[in-house]
Amino acid sequence: MNVNKAIIIGRLTRDPELRSTPSGRQVASLSVATSFRYKDQSGQQQERTEFHNVVAWGKQAEVIAQYFVKGQEIYVEGRLETRNWDDKDSGKKMYRTEIILEKFEFGAKPQGANSGYGNNSSAQQNNNASSAEAGNDNSAKDNSPKSETQVEDEDIPTINLDDEQDDVKIEDVPF
């Protein structure tokens, strides 16, 4: 049995970069920092930070580019993939290991950042997302004013990614 699964929760080190492949498919690149705390041999508390390269495709790439900012927390599930290429200048073979995003969740915004979905909310975007709630009758909804932390269903983006099941072709990768 083989398993290739990566799960991280961290903060974006820069705003997501959204690009299009020559065929028009959207791809977003993110850098996510995670930290690990441990005690060294002398008993001193140490912290080590890892930086992860994450790649999102299709609708997920569009949502991430639209709603995420540097410093925001993100939950990422995906698979590890290593690509290689020959450096144009040195001719040396280069390698880059990335997490190919399969599922993500919104995390806390950086302090002072404003959002349309509230600072305590969480939204999940994955390949099993459905539009089951689209037919719900909202006429009985409470019309009281919203506080900053209350979240209405229509404030959270919902995307059906069932049509995004195509495999990524290497010729579509713009980098």
Image: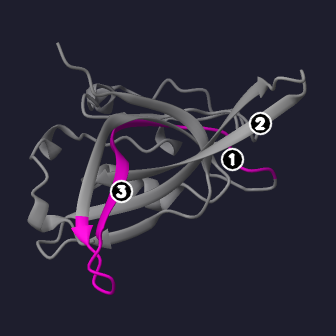
Q: Residue at x 63, y 59 (%)?
A: 70
What amino acid is labelled 1 in the image?
Lys
Q: Residue furthest top?
A: 1
Q: Is residue 32 above or below residue 2?
A: below
Q: Quadrant of residue 61?
A: bottom left
Does the magenta run of residues contain 104?
yes
Observer-side mark, 1 or 2, equals 2
Q: Earlier in the sequence, mark 2 or mark 3?
A: 2
What amino acid is labelled 3 in the image?
Arg
Helix, strand or loop under label 3: strand
The residue that disc 3 covers is: 96
Helix, strand or loop under label 1: loop
Q: Separation of disc 1 and disc 3 at Cα?
A: 28 Å
User: 50 or 160: nearer the eye?
Assistant: 50
Give the magenta-colored segment's residue range.
85-111
Q: Earlier in the sequence, mark 1 or mark 3?
A: 3
Q: Separation of disc 2 and disc 3 at Cα?
A: 24 Å
Q: Is residue 121 above or below residue 31?
A: above
Does the magenta run of residues contain 120?
no
Q: Quadrant of residue 157?
A: top left
Q: Specify how the rendered protein is coloured.
A: one colour
Q: Residue at x 25, y 34 (%)?
A: 127
Helix, strand or loop under label 2: strand
Left or right: where 31 falls relative to 83:
right
The residue that disc 2 covers is: 47
User: 56 or 32: nearer the eye?
Assistant: 32
Q: Residue furthest bottom?
A: 89
> For the residue carrying disc 2, how many other residues have a C-alpha within 10 Å: few (<14), some (14-19), or many (20+)?
few
Q: Earlier in the sequence, mark 1 or mark 2?
A: 2
